[in-house]
Image (cartoon, coloured by chain):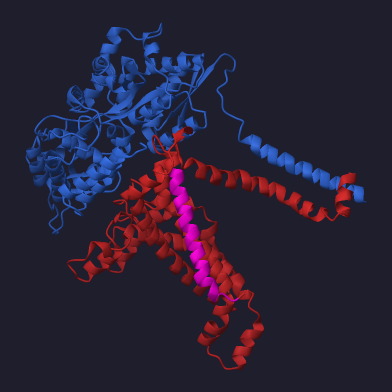
Chain colours: A red, B blue
């Protein structure tokens, strides 16, 4: 083992030790993350079916993707989903975290309750909510009925929510382009917010507890109102946490799949394809009969590019307002 | 002290490498069908569940009992989509099963990938089928499993659509026969749709159904239309015949019927709230014992002509399997499609027997006795057609269902607009540079 002591003398040891510690995790990440990403990139330029490479086709998959209206539809659906889930989840999580940060009774109980959906299997969550949303047997319509409201079709309603609101308000005509996400998609969004909020609350709580008490004391001495305290102390000092929650929720929302797969349809992505998000589109193209892995890889890379771009934009725009 | 430390590091390094290696190796082991104590194991992947799965497992157990040297391993994937994904992934990984249910589109993809075993040699081999036996298969069924003169798959669980009708509700209206044509279909649906308790709300419907391309395709055929053009390069369902068929379907299901999600329309029918429903003959096994009225089945009403599509899957054998396994799989296929067994399978499940002579078997005759009209329903096989069997159409049918049928049934678009949009999507699917 003299070579190790030689290395140590030459001060090479410490980086080497560090490297050794990284090896186990590194192998796992390399095999199960990097390798698939690399091969997806590679495969997207080839005609691959059933694991067999049939030849190089350059950018043909990307061209095909560009021309496919169902791709653009799935992208639009995903955009609605992200635009709905991210702000609502952030707002509700922050609100709950601020309330939970106060010294209220049974605090531990509330924290547990909010976190429960996060540790519950998403499959179980989806099945239960599918029943809750059931137009005839579901809990939600039952409650609506009791409260004198009219039953909704929920997961079976392809019409856009804005259109539904407009028609409830008595407007006979509403432009197709402004129909908004289908009620079915909104139902899935509700489940996603409900499911993911506990995690965001915990992150926000950790952020809130990192804000030193002196600032609050100083603000109180200066006679600041609770709203002023929130906007002048809490909000700026919480901004790194908010930024992280924004990024991670955006990324996770773009990749939504399980809820869609289990709650919508049949056929999945229905009604009328209004809940067919991009990852389901990818799944359908890659794994159904005669599945085309090369094409699915191209979809995955486009999704990767979209998420990366958005993250970079968020960094540029939002990070300027973050106080570290 | 220092040596102890470095020793520990050495062990840690060794462990780390071993861990990494074991992870890598774990991905490479497994698979392979081994012959233990002279018994040839044949994993059979299928999508049969519920009463169908029970019936299949019973028959498989019986086969295994009679063939001590063969063990067919029944592995249910639950549903067709999952089965398709598992097959494609297994083939990609080089570890396919020996035997699997497959739609024609999947078989075509497997042939293209050189993964499907041609069955012609087995048919002509020592344990094969005679010319008489081959002629006994229901006309069209073997042809639809033949590509360029080679048989690659065998009809396994095949069904046709039927009209189920509630005789009690019909009698209450002074009616005694199922509709035999579209005009009667609509007329009877109208008469059976009513408010029975006088509260101002409809509570009995003429018919009910779910949103499915399948019903439309059958209507299209009856109206003289076709799904794709003859050369299979373009959608043809948006023809005037197709538009008329979809208009009829919309009238039927929205004016005199109700649309439900999934199979709820069957529950409504079983509850005696619906006069008649269309369904696969397989629905019989799911409805068995769940209704209290007099029920009968009838062939689908005729349009301009008679027409119905055959649904259901076939079985394929995988090329990669060992010869012993493939021979065993063939023995099972031959046994399962024999007149006696296919008749019992048909009685248990409602699937159509794949052999003509099976209809004369005691089991089948007793079944015809028990289910009024079933014999006539199976007569539809004489003029039945098959859907296009390309994987383009497998993907295309989804477009037809989603953009065509669903959009029109929900009155989002007119039938013509909806079918034109769906046809364009299907044309795109077919025209893609890299076929799906």
Residue at 49 percent across and 40 percent down: it is A43
Position of A8 with respect to B197 (left or right) is: right
Residue at 41 percent across and 62 percent down: it is A190
The residue closer to the viewer here, B340 or B111, is B111
The residue closer to the viewer here, B4 or A97, is B4
- How many numbered discs, if any? 0
Image coordinates for residue B324, horizontal then vertical, percent: 50, 14
Say which quarter of the image contains residue A287: top left
Q: Is residue B360 positioned above or below B250 on the image?
A: above
The residue closer to the viewer here, B51 or B69, is B69
Image coordinates for residue A99, horizontal then vertical, percent: 53, 76
Q: Work out whether residue A139 can be spotted.
A: no
Please identify the dominant SS of the magenta region.
helix
Q: Is residue A14 magenta?
A: no
Image coordinates for residue A18, horizontal then vertical, percent: 76, 54
Q: Is residue B79 positioned above or below B330 on the image?
A: below
Image quadrant holding the C terminus of chain B, namely: top left
Position of A130 with respect to B360 (left or right) is: right
The residue closer to the viewer here, B236 or A114, is B236
Residue at 82 percent across and 53 percent down: it is A12
Q: Which residues are magenta?
A: A296-323
Q: Work out whether residue B138 can be spotted.
A: yes
Q: Is residue A320 magenta?
A: yes
Q: Is residue B161 positioned above or below B208 on the image?
A: above
Work out which residue is located at the far top of the displayed protein and give it.
B126
Image coordinates for residue B270, horizontal then vertical, percent: 25, 41
């Amino acid at each position: 083992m003299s070579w190790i002591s030689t290395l140590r003398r030459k001060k090479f040891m410490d980086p080497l030790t560090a490297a050794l510690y990284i090896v186990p995790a590194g192998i796992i990440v390399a095999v199960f993350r990097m390798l698939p990403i690399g091969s997806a990139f590679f495969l997207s330029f080839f005609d691959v079916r059933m694991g067999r490479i049939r030849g190089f086709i350059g950018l043909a998959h990307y061209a095909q993707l560009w021309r496919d209206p169902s791709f653009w539809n799935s992208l639009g659906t995903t955009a609605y989903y992200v635009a709905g889930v991210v702000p609502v989840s952030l707002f509700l999580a922050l609100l709950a975290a601020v309330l939970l940060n106060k010294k209220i009774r049974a605090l531990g109980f509330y924290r547990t309750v909010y976190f429960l959906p996060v540790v519950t299997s998403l499959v179980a969550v989806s099945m239960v909510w599918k029943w809750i949303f059931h137009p005839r047997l579901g809990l939600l319509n039952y409650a609506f009925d009791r409260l004198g409201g009219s039953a909704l079709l929920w997961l079976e309603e392809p019409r856009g929510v804005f259109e539904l609101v407009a028609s409830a308000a008595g407007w006979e005509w509403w432009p197709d382009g402004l129909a908004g996400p289908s009620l079915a998609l909104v139902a899935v969004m509700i489940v996603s917010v409900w499911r993911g909020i506990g995690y965001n609350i915990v992150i926000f709580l950790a952020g809130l507890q990192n804000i030193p008490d002196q600032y609050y004391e100083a603000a109180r001495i200066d006679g600041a109102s609770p709203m002023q305290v929130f906007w002048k102390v809490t909000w700026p000092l919480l901004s790194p946490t908010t930024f992280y929650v924004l990024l991670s929720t955006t990324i996770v929302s773009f990749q939504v799949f399980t809820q869609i797969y289990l709650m919508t349809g049949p056929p999945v992505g229905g009604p009328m394809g209004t809940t067919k998000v991009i990852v389901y589109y990818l799944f359908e193209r890659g794994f159904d009969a005669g599945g085309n892995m090369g094409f699915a890889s191209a979809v995955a890379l486009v999704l990767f590019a979209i998420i990366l771009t958005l993250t970079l934009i968020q960094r540029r725009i939002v990070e300027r307002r973050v106080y570290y | 002290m220092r040596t102890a430390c470095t020793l520990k590091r050495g062990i840690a390094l060794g462990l780390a490498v071993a861990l990494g290696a074991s992870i890598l190796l774990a991905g490479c082991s497994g698979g392979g069908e081994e012959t233990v104590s002279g018994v040839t194991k044949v994993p059979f992947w299928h999508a049969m569940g519920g009463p169908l799965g029970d019936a299949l497992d019973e028959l498989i157990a019986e086969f295994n009992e009679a063939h001590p040297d063969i063990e067919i391993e029944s592995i249910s994937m639950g549903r067709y989509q999952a089965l398709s994904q598992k097959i494609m992934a297994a083939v990609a990984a080089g570890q396919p099963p020996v035997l699997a249910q497959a739609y024609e589109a999947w078989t075509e993809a497997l042939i293209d990938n050189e993964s499907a075993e041609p069955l012609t040699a087995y048919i002509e081999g020592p344990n094969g089928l005679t010319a008489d036996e081959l002629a006994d298969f229901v006309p069209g069924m073997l042809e639809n499993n033949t590509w360029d003169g080679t048989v690659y798959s065998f009809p396994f669980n095949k069904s046709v659509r039927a009209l189920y009708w509630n005789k009690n509700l019909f009698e209450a209206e002074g009616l005694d026969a199922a509709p035999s044509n579209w005009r009667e279909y609509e007329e009877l649906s109208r008469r059976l749709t009513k408010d029975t308790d006088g509260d101002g709300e409809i509570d009995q419907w003429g018919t009910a159904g779910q949103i499915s391309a399948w019903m439309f395709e059958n209507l299209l055929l009856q109206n003289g239309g076709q799904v794709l053009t003859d050369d299979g390069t373009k959608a043809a369902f948006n023809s005037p015949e197709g538009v008329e068929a979809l208009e009829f379907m919309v009238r039927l299901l929205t004016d005199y019927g109700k649309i439900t999600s999934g199979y709820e329309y069957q529950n409504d029918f079983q509850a005696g709230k619906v006069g008649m429903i269309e369904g696969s003959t397989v629905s019989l096994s799911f409805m068995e014992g769940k209704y209290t009225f007099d029920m009968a089945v009838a062939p689908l009403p005729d349009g301009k002509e008679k027409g119905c599509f055959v649904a259901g899957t076939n079985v394929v054998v995988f090329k990669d399997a060992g010869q012993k396994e493939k021979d065993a799989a063939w023995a099972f296929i031959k046994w399962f499609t024999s007149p006696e067994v296919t008749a019992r399978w048909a009685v248990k499940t409602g699937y159509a027997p794949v052999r003509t002579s099976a209809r004369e078997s005691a089991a089948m005759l007793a079944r015809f006795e028990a289910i009024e009209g079933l014999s006539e329903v199976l007569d539809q096989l004489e003029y039945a057609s098959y859907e296009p069997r390309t994987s383009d159409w497998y993907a295309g049918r989804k477009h037809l269902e989603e953009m065509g049928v669903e959009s029109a049934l929900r009155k989002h678009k007119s039938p013509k607009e909806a079918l034109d949009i769906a046809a364009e999507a299907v044309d795109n699917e077919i025209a893609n540079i890299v076929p799906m």
